[in-house]
Amino acid sequence: MLRSEELQRFLDAAFVAFDRYAVDTRARQSIMQLFSILESAQPSRPGPGKRLPVVDRFLAPALEIQSDDVVLATLLDRFKAIEEQLEWKTRSIYDHTASANFLLGHGNALVVGPQALEHRTDAWLGASLLAPDVRYPDHNHAPEETYLVLSEGEFSQVDGEWFAPGIGGSFFNPPNIKHAMRSGTKPLFAFWALLPETPHH
Ligand SMILES: [Fe+2]
């Protein structure tokens, strides 16, 4: 089977939301390219997804956002509709910049991307969930990245000040930039869209 209707509906809502909230010029260029790549569907991974205890405990409260923004509400509803097909994973590589509760306190789910619900290498779209009071380790990656934040929580780039984009906030990570995130008293939930270098574009 190619792309399911639920997945297509989620991707449509993600495009609307990123388009609405991404303000950085580089981010806008990146997501336009990414969603144009995603117009061609790849096969879906069959079978159920895999949850983690942190997801059982904190995803539902994280998704109960206090916003009457119909764009974000639609995005979250459509994420919920595909969530049980996703494989939540923990990041196995981390250093002293991570908090001690990091490993059990976070989950990442790729919707499209390598080994995702829709496996592909040309565009990645996924989400991160952090339990309260978790500091995600400093990390970097070659693909450029646009975040769309759906909760409270703070982010940093290249050891700069922590900043809180807020619900509907968006920012851009250029290729290989060092970045991190941390939750406060509430869980952190954010979508990210990564675009590897695409020489054919
Ligand atoms: Fe990242």
Image (cartoon, rainbow, N blue to C red):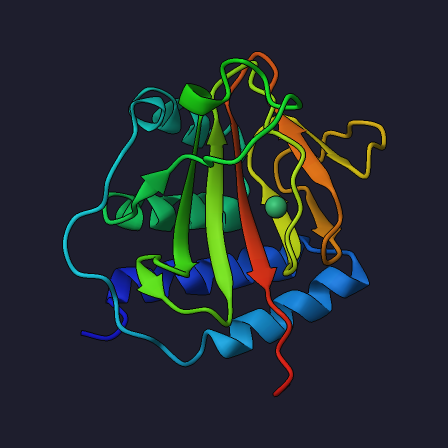
- On the image, the x and y values in percent for residue 94 come to 56, 31
> Looking at the image, which residue is at 55% across and 37% down?
150
Q: Residue furthest right?
A: 160
Q: Is residue 27 left or right of residue 16?
A: right
Quarter of the image where the N terminus is located = bottom left
In front: 71, or 14? 14
> Looking at the image, which residue is at 22% across and 46% down?
49
Q: Relative to residue 11, is residue 165 depicted above or below?
A: above
Q: Residue furthest bottom?
A: 200
- On the image, the x and y values in percent for residue 7 come to 32, 61
> Looking at the image, which residue is at 29% across and 47% down?
86
Quarter of the image where the C terminus is located = bottom right
Q: Is residue 157 left or right of residue 98?
A: right
Q: Relative to residue 198, is residue 196 depicted above or below?
A: above
- On the image, the x and y values in percent for residue 165 come to 71, 35
Q: Is residue 114 left or right of residue 47?
A: right
The quadrant in which residue 4 appears is bottom left
Q: How many marks?
A: 0
Q: Residue furthest left?
A: 47
> Looking at the image, which residue is at 72% across and 29% down?
164
- On the image, the x and y values in percent for residue 29 come to 71, 70
In front: 9, or 39? 39
